[in-house]
Image (tube, rainbow, N blue to C red):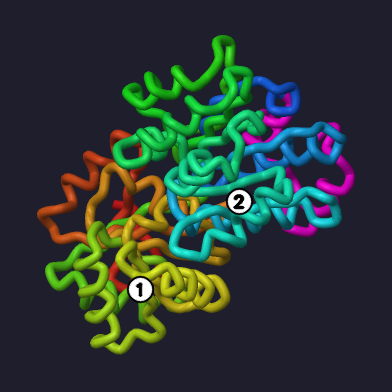
C-alpha cells in the first residue's frame, strides 16, 4: 500500500498482512484525502483494516481528529477495537471499545482522556453523545461497518441520529458486502455529493466451496459429518431455541466440545464462548449474531442448519477468509433443496452434493 506509515506497515506485516487486498488498496487514497467513501467487497477481504489503516495513517502523520466506528454487535466492537490497537501498536493513538453490559465509567474516563478512535455499538455511542461525555463537535469521521445492517430496522434510528449530530463537514465511510437499493437511499443521505465508490469483486469471493448434505434426521446427519471431518467448525441456526436444541442434540450424539452462542446469553458468557472458540477448536453452534464480520481464525467449515437468504453469504464468509479456503455445507431435507438452489442462484453460486463420507465432494 503505497505511502503507508512504516510503523503501521510493520504492525500489519506482524499481523499477517503480507499482501494487501484490493479493497484495502483501493480505499486508502480516498480516505487519506478526506473523501466520503462507500466500499463494497466480499466477506473475508479485510474491510476493517481497509478503513482503519488510512485513518491511523493520518493520525500517525500528525493530523488531529476523532473518529467514531459503529459496529452492529459487541463482538464486532471488541474485534475491531483489538485489531485497531494491534495496528496502532507503538504509537500514541488511543482506542476505546464502547458497548453496553459493562461498567461504563472506564469507557467514559478513556474518552475524556482523549481517545482518538471510539469503536462502539450505536446505542452506546448515542448514550455517550447525549450525556456529552463525547462531544459531537469533536468528531470528524464516522465509519459504519456492516453499513447495510446498521441502516436496517433496529439500528437505523440510532445510526442516523448519531450521524445527524455530527458536523456537516464530517467524513463518512460506509463499508459492507452489499448495499440493497432501499438501503442505498438511506446511505446516500449520509454521504456528501461526489463521494468515492470502491467496489471490488462480486458479493462473494471464490475461496469458499458450497455443498448440500441431505437427510431427514438433520441433527444426526450433522453429528455424523462433524465426526467424519473433525475440523474447526461453526454451525448456524436462525433462532435461539433451534441453536440451543441443536447444541444439546450434538452433545447427545457424542460431540465434544460443543459451544453455544446467542443473544440471550449474558455479555460475560458471550465473551467467554468467543474466547474459548477462538483459542481452541471444536464446534460452535450459533445464531446469526456472529454471522456478520466476526473473524474466527482457522475455521475450515461452516454448516448452515437452515436456509437463510439474508444471512447465507455472511454465514459462509466465516470461512475462506483472507485468501484461505473453506467449505459451507447446508444441512437440508430433500424438500428444502430446491429452495436453497433458488437462493444461491440469485447470488451466482453453484452448489454440489456432499457425498455420504463428508470428505470428498462430488459435483451434482
The residue depicted at 69 percent of the width and 37 percent of the height is 66
Instruction: Please name which of the two marks, 2 or 1, marks the residue nearer to the observer.
Output: 1
Q: Does the image show residue 121?
A: yes
18 vs 78, nearest the viewer: 78
The numbered mark at residue 318 is: none
Q: Which residue is mark 2?
A: 322
Outermost residue toward the right in this view: 6
Q: Which residue is mark 1?
A: 260
Range shown magenta: 1-29
Horizontal relation, residue 234 to residue 58: left or right = left
The residue depicted at 72 percent of the width and 36 percent of the height is 55
142 vs 316, nearest the viewer: 142
Q: Does the image show residue 42?
A: no
Taking 287 as reference, is 141 above or below it? above
Outermost residue toward the front in this view: 131
User: Dividing the image into 4 quarters, which one contains the N terminus?
Assistant: top right
Residue 236 at what x, y percent from top left?
32, 61
- Pointers 2 and 1 in contact (C-beta within 8 Å): no
Magenta stretch contains residue 22:
yes
How far is the residue under mark 2 from the one under mark 1?
26 Å
Residue 249 at what x, y percent from top left?
22, 80
Amino acid at each position: 500500500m503505497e505511502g503507508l506509515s512504516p510503523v503501521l506497515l510493520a504492525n500489519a506485516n506482524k499481523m499477517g498482512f503480507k499482501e494487501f487486498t484490493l479493497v484495502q488498496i483501493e480505499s486508502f487514497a480516498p480516505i487519506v484525502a478526506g473523501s466520503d467513501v462507500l466500499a463494497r467487497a466480499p466477506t473475508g477481504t479485510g474491510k476493517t483494516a481497509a478503513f482503519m489503516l488510512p485513518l491511523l495513517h493520518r493520525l500517525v502523520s500528525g493530523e488531529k481528529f476523532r473518529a467514531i466506528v459503529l459496529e452492529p454487535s459487541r463482538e464486532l466492537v471488541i474485534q475491531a477495537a483489538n485489531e485497531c490497537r494491534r495496528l496502532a501498536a507503538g504509537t500514541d493513538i488511543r482506542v476505546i471499545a464502547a458497548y453496553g453490559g459493562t461498567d461504563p465509567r472506564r469507557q467514559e474516563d478513556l474518552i475524556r482522556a482523549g481517545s482518538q478512535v471510539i469503536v462502539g455499538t450505536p446505542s452506546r455511542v448515542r448514550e455517550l453523545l447525549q450525556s456529552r461525555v463525547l462531544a459531537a463537535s469533536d468528531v470528524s469521521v464516522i465509519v459504519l461497518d456492516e453499513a447495510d445492517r446498521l441502516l436496517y430496522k433496529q439500528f437505523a434510528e440510532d445510526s442516523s441520529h448519531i450521524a445527524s449530530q455530527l458536523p456537516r463537514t464530517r467524513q463518512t465511510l460506509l463499508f459492507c458486502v452489499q448495499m440493497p437499493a432501499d438501503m442505498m437511499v438511506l446511505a446516500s443521505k449520509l454521504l456528501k455529493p461526489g463521494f468515492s465508490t470502491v467496489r471490488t469483486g462480486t458479493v462473494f469471493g471464490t475461496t469458499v466451496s458450497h455443498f448440500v448434505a441431505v437427510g431427514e434426521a438433520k441433527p444426526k446427519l450433522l453429528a455424523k459429518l462433524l465426526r467424519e471431518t473433525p475440523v474447526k467448525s461453526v454451525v448456524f441456526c436462525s433462532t435461539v431455541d433451534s441453536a440451543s436444541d441443536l447444541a444439546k442434540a450434538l452433545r447427545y450424539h457424542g460431540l465434544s466440545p460443543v459451544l453455544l452462542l446467542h443473544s440471550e446469553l449474558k455479555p460475560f458468557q458471550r465473551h467467554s464462548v468467543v474466547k474459548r472458540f477462538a483459542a481452541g477448536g471444536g464446534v460452535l453452534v450459533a445464531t446469526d449474531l456472529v454471522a456478520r464480520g466476526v473473524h474466527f481464525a482457522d475455521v475450515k467449515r461452516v454448516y448452515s442448519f437452515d436456509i437463510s437468504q439474508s444471512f447465507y453469504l455472511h454465514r459462509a464468509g466465516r470461512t475462506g477468509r483472507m485468501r484461505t479456503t473453506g467449505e459451507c455445507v447446508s444441512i437440508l431435507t430433500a424438500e428444502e433443496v430446491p429452495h436453497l438452489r433458488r437462493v444461491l442462484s440469485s447470488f451466482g453460486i453453484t452448489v454440489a452434493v456432499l457425498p455420504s463420507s463428508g470428505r470428498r465432494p462430488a459435483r451434482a
